Amino acid sequence: MPAQQNKRMRFRVVAPAYPAFNIYSRIARQTTALGPVSVATVASTLQGWDAEVIDENNYRKFGPVDSEGLPDHRTLQVIRRADVVGLYGGLSSTIPRLYRIARFYKENGAITIAGGQHFTGDNIADALKNGIDYVVIGEGVHTTAELLNAIRSGAPTESIAGIAYLKGNSVVMGPPRPPMTDFNSLPIPDFSLVRYARITLFPVGWIRGCGMNCEFCTVKGTPRPAEPERVLEQIASILEKHHCRNIFIVDDLFGWRKDETMRVCRLLADYQKAVNTRLNLTVQIRLDRGRDTELLQAMREAGVNTVCIGFESPIPEELAAMNKKTKPEEMIELTRMYHKNGFFVHGMFIFGYPLPSGASFNMQAQERVRIFRRFIAKARLDTIQVLLPVPLPGTEMTRRLAEQRRIFPLEEIGWEYYDGNFPLFMPDPPMTPAQMQASIRKIMGRFYRFRSMFSVAKNVIMFPALVFTLFDIRAGWRSWYRTWRNDLIRFGGWLILRRWLSEFRKNTFSERLRRAEEIVKRAAPAG
């Protein structure tokens, strides 16, 4: 590899666009992924390197676009030529677009690097055959920095830990890189590196890994938290540089260690008093933390307004299959504790979870829908997300379904459908794949409804009578605001679902699904 030490080089990280029929495009236009920003931030500190991020899902004013309305990478190369391009594979549904971008850059002389949770097992070789020069395995910050230094100096890359590449027609795997633990050695993520974006919801990281070991999840390993002070430093940096108070702490384990979580909450509460402002924080937390009223109160004082909770399912048999110990009745009681302490609760569910072999459980799709609807109404969830199980690369659930020959072939149902809105395997009988997909639309369609628009108008008209006639004006405001906010979101959700359904009807998925079912049925073991 020739040395290029006499000129500055540019490293461009690209987060590929979702497929056109993805329902998450709206929220994606408000935020960005933390991983690409963290990698680019470290790269920008390397001698002789400039770095930038192109988030194709949050790409706005002055960003050149092509005839499809997507970022025009050919023009970007004219404006600011990238020598090395990193491609973020955190979401399997973006992989077809990722490979398309990679092939363009490789054909135009750039070195391509890919990383993210998609790249494991056979997917590594697949990437190296689709325009990728190096695959970064696992956490990519230090690996990418070492790789960029080697590229610039012309040094060999064989000894770099955590990479894979082709040598001839063979995949070469470098030595494994241990997980990071010293997060304080990293610079604070620099969101100014994200070009052409307008970020109104900023991601913040605290804990890497998750010890829950859910068989359907790609986040594994012993939890590794940063110091509580680093959480404050990230949030203060966002407030000072970008004047934004909306923060999403992206980790799955907020509240994992109570003492450290209480420390984070106290730091944030004191900081907000010192700067005379109020943050709007969203966190992901386990449902059972609702038993700890001291923790919940500290979270409210810290500015946590919304909690995202993985309820997964209100069906006991499915909860048992997921190794979840909480019963549906307890789930409702714990949800009430979060509401009692003033939180908005966003409920996340998986519909039609595949049970292990030998499980004796048969339930019609319409009965499952009825149970889901009843639970959601009884728990009085503020917002919901109901997805189908996704056999993500490297998970135990994927291995189990593959052994049972239930996963639809990628030749028919490609990666672009791996977003939770499409059936990807043969479900447990008596359900059919089409019934699975229709069911989540029925559940979400009942929750996110057009008639919520009329409730929004009604609440605006009733605001003075409801709030100012009450003795406790603050409590009246909270009650009114929750109803008004939820109705507004539900109407917005109806618009999103309507648009998604319109795009879906233009798609060829139904025909693809029919062919995929036939292939799987023919391959199923006899008996």
Image (cartoon, helix red, strand yellow):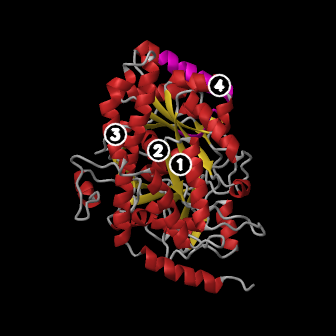
Mark 4 lies on a secondary structure that is helix
Of the numbered discs 4 and 2, the one sitting upstream in the chain is 2
Q: Are marks 2 and 1 in contact (CB under 8 Å)?
A: yes
Amino acid found under the numbered disc labelled 2:
Val
Q: Which residues are magenta?
A: 250-271
Closest to the camera, between mark 3 and mark 2, is 3
Q: CA distance from mark 3 to mark 1?
A: 45 Å
Amino acid found under the numbered disc labelled 3:
Val
Residue 478 coordinates in the image, percent (x, y): 44, 26
Residue at the farthest top position = 274
Residue 43 coordinates in the image, percent (x, y): 43, 43
Disc 3: CA contacts within 10 A as few (<14), some (14-19) or many (>=20)? some
Q: CA distance from mark 4 to mark 3?
A: 32 Å
Amino acid found under the numbered disc labelled 1:
Gly
What residue did someone put label 3 on?
456
Q: Are marks 3 and 1 in contact (CB under 8 Å)?
A: no
Closest to the camera, between mark 4 and mark 3, is 3
Residue 388 numbered mark, or none: none
What residue did someone put label 4 on?
293
Predominant secondary structure in magenta? helix
Disc 4: CA contacts within 10 A as few (<14), some (14-19) or many (>=20)? some
* Residue 523 lies within the magenta run: no
What residue appears at the point 56 percent right and 26 percent down from the top-left corner?
A: 299
What residue did someone put label 2 on?
39
Task: Please say whether residue 28 is visible from this viewpoint.
Answer: no
What residue did someone put label 1 on?
140
Disc 2: CA contacts within 10 A as few (<14), some (14-19) or many (>=20)? many
Of the numbered discs 3 and 1, the one sitting upstream in the chain is 1
What residue appears at the point 55 percent right and 72 percent down from the top-left corner?
A: 433
